[in-house]
Amino acid sequence: MLEEQIKIALNTVRPSLQADGGDVEFVSMAEDGTVSLKLTGACGGCPMAQMTLKMGIESFLKKEVPQVTAVVGV
């Protein structure tokens, strides 16, 4: 259920990433609420990838799914 909520929330941010030639993939969620994501395409090698993960995706996921405590890239 929680994983599904995260995937739905990621589908909301996905078009913005795809517009720049990238994408995001859900990898896993730990029991402490840490979500592991993989940035792909142009986002995978972008120097701003960490900022996208933390300032963009993490902030959004925490708001949409309160059980999310952090987002990390893999």
Image (spheres, rainbow, N blue to C red):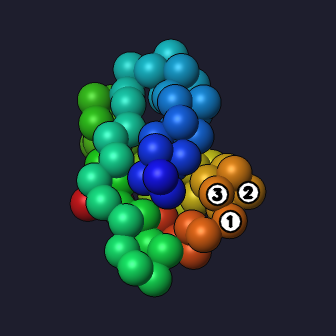
40 lies above or below 73: above
As helix, strand or loop, the secondary structure at mark 1 comes to loop
Q: CA separation, marks 3 and 2? A: 6 Å
Residue 44 located left or right of residue 61: left
Q: Which mark is residue 65?
A: 3
Can you say which quadrant of the picture contains the C terminus?
bottom left
Indicate the amino acid at tag 1: Pro
Snapshot quadrant of residue 35: bottom left
Foreground residue, 4 or 28? 4
* Residue at 28% in and 36% down: 40
- Residue 67 in percent (x, y) is at 60, 69
Q: Which residue is mark 2?
A: 63
Q: Is residue 44 left or right of residue 59?
A: left
The answer to whether marks 3 and 2 mark residues whose Cβ atoms lie closer than 8 Å is no
Q: Position of residue 42 (x, y in %)?
A: 33, 30
**Amino acid marked by disc 2:** Lys
* Mark 2 burial class by Cα count in 10 Å: few <14, some 14-19, many 20+: few
User: Can you tell which of label 2 and label 1 is closer to the viewer?
Assistant: 1
Q: Can the viewer see residue 31? A: yes
Residues at discs 2 and 1 in contact (Cβ within 8 Å): yes
Marking on residue 66: 1
